[in-house]
Amino acid sequence: MELKNTKATANVSVFHSLDWFTIILYLLLVTAGAISIYAASYDFDHASMFSFEEFSGKQFMWIGLGLILGLSILLLDYRIYEAYAYPIYGIVILLLLLTIFIAPDVKGSRSWIVLGPVSLQPAEFGKFATALALGKLFSSYNFALNANKTNYYRALMIIFMPIILILLQKETGSALVYFSLIFVLYREGMSGLVLFSVLCAVVYFVVAVKFADPLILGIPMGEFTVLLIISLIFCCMLLFYCRDIIIARNVIFFFAIYGIVVTVLSFCGITLNGIIFFLSMLGVGIIYVAIAMLRHPVQKFLTTIAFACIGILFLFSVNYAFNNVLQPHQQNRIKVTLGIVEDLRGVGYNVNQSKIAIGSGGIIGKGFLNGTQTKLKYVPEQHTDFIYCTIGEEEGFIGAVGVLVLFTIFILRILHIAERQRTAFGRVYAYCVVSYMIFHLGINIGMVLGLCPVIGIPLPFFSYGGSSLWGFTILIFILLRIDASRKERRD
């Protein structure tokens, strides 16, 4: 009898301690998502939003089942999620591995397990399992990310295991989501130089590919620009990271004189090779810094030199990676996104029609169920990956911004929950949820607006599909259960 009373008290405490504001936001998002799916797939033969013949009716079914799943998660003891984090992660990893061999080929991807009339994508469930495993790792006794390199390797192994398996399923978009967990590592002590390196890599790649044709000093304008950026970053790191004004001043002075001399020679008709110009300039600067650092703390200067050298090597690998590693359809999507080519009837068709739909909505939109682009099926996948264009067309700028505001409030609320956690497990798990949400939101909106390549990233709670909805529902409700346990432990 006493045990039953304890369980009953615990359950009452859970619902009393829940963050109901987050639940209300969740319900608003999933309801708005189902209505948007109805608007995107509506035709005049089936008028009922709740009919199973409509995508919206099926989505409402997924929402109902998701709420039951969420309730079940809340009723479980919060200790289960930390205690069984590694076994859950292991089971999901095995499922991802099994998917490679048993999943049918769907548009070149083997990422969907078919169970009768239902298809599930295990990659969506790998998100919460990876988040639990990372939280468990960081909550280990005396664990600190910067304590030794082994801790980095353990964290990266947890992140990259699902990435590798999902890539083997040929589902690039779902695999890229897991790279967002780099923000979790940054929150837990990883150097900001890593994030800066990632940003530089993206900039180098985009510039090198975008401006591959125009020539400056006999080399592509893209390579010239990236080498110039690397030179500027090298000088800035000496000045602001190494904080050595004298060395930075000497290097900047040398680069300036060297550049002026080359510019004068080029105006005099002397042809110079841009690669030789930059490599010789940077080479002299690096050698000077290497000699000068013998009288200074070595680590920061070595990091600066390594940053420049790795940047140069990365630049020269871009063309090979773009032409030999990426698939032709991936190359075309990147070229269309960067405006290198226009393929309005091929790869660029979806994005072009999506932008037309959003633009036609104006400020206030055409009204619910009045979107002509939607009704005439001009935008493929408009109820899944391109659901946002339906919102833009029918609800206009106001509705599109309203959805973004709702997502922003939701993300900020999760950040608030993350920062009030009393354990590393809860904090790390919460930041994993935030990272997934920001990545999905940013990339999906970017795809629809033509700012990012189309890589098949759904809009959370809005895009049609049970796997995505359930995956995010599990993420959110586990977080809510962990958060509710704060008051249980205090009481």
Image: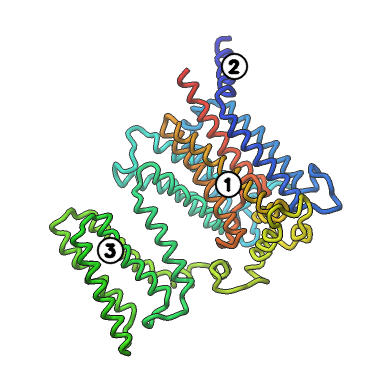
Q: Amino acid at mark 1?
A: Glu
Q: Sequence-wise, which precedes: disc 2 or disc 3?
A: 2
x and y, in percent, of residue 72 in the image = 62, 29
Q: Residue furthest left?
A: 295
Mark 2 falls on what kind of element?
Answer: helix
x and y, in percent, of residue 136 in the image = 43, 36
Cα gap from disc 2 to disc 1, whole angstroms: 33 Å
Q: Which residue lies under the disc numbered 1?
A: 124
Cα gap from disc 2 to disc 3, whole angstroms: 64 Å
Q: Residue at x 41, y 57 (%)?
A: 198
Mark 3 falls on what kind of element?
Answer: helix
The quarter holding residue 226 reads bottom left
Up/down of 256 relative to 103, above or below:
below
Q: Residue furthest front?
A: 363
Q: Which residue lies under the disc numbered 3?
A: 235
The quarter holding residue 314 reads bottom left
Q: Sequence-wise, which precedes: disc 2 or disc 1?
A: 2
Q: Sequence-wise, which precedes: disc 1 or disc 3?
A: 1
Q: Residue at x 59, y 16 (%)?
A: 8
x and y, in percent, of residue 316 in the image = 38, 71
Q: Which one is in front, 241 or 318?
A: 241
Q: Which residue lies under the disc numbered 2?
A: 8
Q: Residue furthest top?
A: 1
For the residue carrying disc 1, how many other residues have a C-alpha within 10 Å: few (<14), some (14-19), or many (20+)?
some
Tell me if label 1 and label 3 are in contact, CB under 8 Å: no
Tell me if label 2 and label 3 are in contact, CB under 8 Å: no
Of tags 1 and 3, the one toward the viewer is 3
Q: Amino acid at mark 2?
A: Ala
Q: Which mark is residue 40?
A: none
Q: Is residue 273 left or right of residue 467?
A: left
Q: Residue at x 23, y 62 (%)?
A: 248
